[in-house]
């Protein structure tokens, strides 16, 4: 069974996956623009390049569809995460978990946003996670 931190961390993992795919998509688009028809003096040989371009375009479309599915999954997961976070009785705990696991901020950004020390933010986090873990059992 998954613990609370593992469940909440799924959004970050999916977000990283989406960003990696977006980088790959940019690379493929740039590659597709580089594929050009080769002209030789005795004949025009563009068929190989056309097939290569078509292959790259198919990869682009497939990757765009995967990204869209990942985004849908991330949105659904964030809705579930928000619902779980809203069950917390402690406002600071809700805020920390929301900033960390929904908005995907780094720990220092969470602390800066809340105006607390990093140690205090971790204390809020630990208490919130303990509460969620007790609710899961």
Image (cartoon, rainbow, N blue to C red):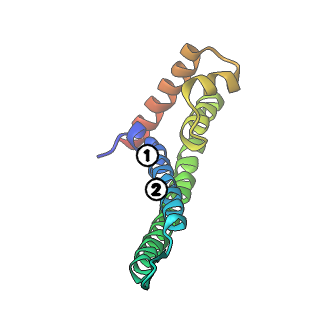
Q: Choose mark 1 or mark 2, whichever is in front.
A: 2
Q: State the CA–CA distance, disc 1 to disc 2.
A: 17 Å
The residue where tag 1 is placed is: 13
Label for residue 49?
none
Looking at the rendered structure, the secondary structure element under dot 1 is helix
The residue where tag 2 is placed is: 24
Name the residue: 56% across, 58% down. Answer: 75
- Find residue 29 and report its horizontal and vertical position in percent: 53, 63
Q: Are marks 1 and 2 in contact (CB under 8 Å)?
A: no
Name the residue: 43% across, 85% down. Answer: 43
- Find residue 6 and report its horizontal and vertical position in percent: 38, 41
**Could you tell whether 113 is left or right of 134 in the image?**
right
Q: Quadrant of residue 106?
A: top right
Name the residue: 40% across, 74% down. Answer: 52
Q: Is residue 28 above or below residue 110?
A: below
The answer to which of 127 and 17 lies nearer the viewer is: 17
- Find residue 128 and report its horizontal and vertical position in percent: 51, 30
């Amino acid at each position: 069974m998954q613990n609370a931190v593992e469940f909440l961390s799924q959004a970050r993992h999916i977000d990283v996956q989406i960003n990696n795919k977006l980088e790959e998509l940019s690379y493929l688009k740039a590659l597709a623009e580089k594929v050009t028809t080769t002209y030789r003096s005795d004949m025009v040989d563009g068929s190989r390049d056309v097939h290569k371009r078509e292959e790259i375009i198919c990869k682009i479309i497939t990757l765009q569809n995967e990204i869209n599915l990942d985004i849908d999954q991330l949105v659904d997961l964030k809705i579930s995460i928000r619902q779980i976070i809203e069950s917390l009785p402690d406002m600071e705990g809700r805020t920390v978990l929301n900033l960390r696991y929904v908005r995907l901020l780094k720990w220092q950004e969470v602390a800066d946003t809340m105006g607390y020390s990093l140690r205090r933010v971790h204390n809020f986090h630990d208490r919130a996670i303990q509460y969620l873990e007790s609710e899961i059992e």
